[in-house]
Image: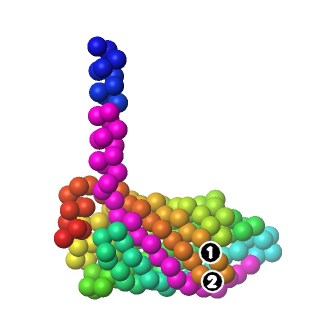
Amino acid sequence: MKILIVLISIVAQSLFATDNNKYYLSVEVIGKSNSKKMQLNNGTVYLLYENSGGFTDNFGNYGNSHCYGKIKTKEEVALNFKIICETVDQNGNKWWGEFTRSETEMAAGVGTAVIVDGTGIYKNLINTKCVFSTRYLNQSYFSLSKCKLTKTVFDKLKK
């Protein structure tokens, strides 16, 4: 009997976890980046960073993204990476996210983002936390963000 109860608990937990994992926003961005840099004598580099790209998400939305920010590196490691991005979809709805990384290689890395503002359907995303990864090839960048959503927010974005 104890084994049956444990087994039911394990199955219930895995089903619940699976159910929670289906409520997310996934955003893919591909674009071009450029930066102006100032290199210090000690090897520290300060970058004024900018990028522009196109995006798609798992709700069928698409549009443009544009980011500005400041990055501090040393020996090709991002010591401080903070950028703000504006994303505009095909309907003119917008959201703004703050993206941060620290202690990751500049050529590729993982960080966190917080959606700080939005219009239209994206108002529902304000304060949503996301994880993102970015890879660079020359001036091209490839980024993927994934944000956990509640069922309520997921359903509002689906409409």
- Compared with residue 114, is residue 32 higher up or lower down, i.e. above or below? below
Residue 139: assigned label = 2
Residue 12 quadrant? top left
Label 1 sits on residue: 136
Query: Within the magenta stretch, is there residue 32?
Result: yes
With 49 as the anchor, is 42 left or right in this view? Answer: right
Density class for disc 1 (Cα within 10 Å; few <14, some 14-19, many ≥20) is: some
Residue 71: assigned label = none
Q: Nearer the viewer, residue 54 or 72?
A: 54
In which quadrant will I find the N terminus? top left
**Which range of residues does the magenta coloring cover?**
11-39
Q: Residue at 66% of width from left, 64% of height from top?
A: 105
Q: Residue at 33% of width from left, 46% of height from top?
A: 18
Q: Amino acid at mark 1?
A: Tyr
Q: Nearer the viewer, residue 124 or 84?
A: 124
The local secondary structure at tag 1 comes to strand
Instruction: Give the percent coordinates (x, y) of residue 120.
Output: 22, 77
Instruction: Give the percent coordinates (x, y) of residue 16.
Output: 29, 41
Residue 4 quadrant? top left
Query: Within the magenta stretch, is there residue 79?
Result: no
Q: Residue at 29% of width from left, 27% of height from top?
A: 8
Q: Amino acid at mark 2?
A: Gln
Q: Residue furthest top?
A: 1
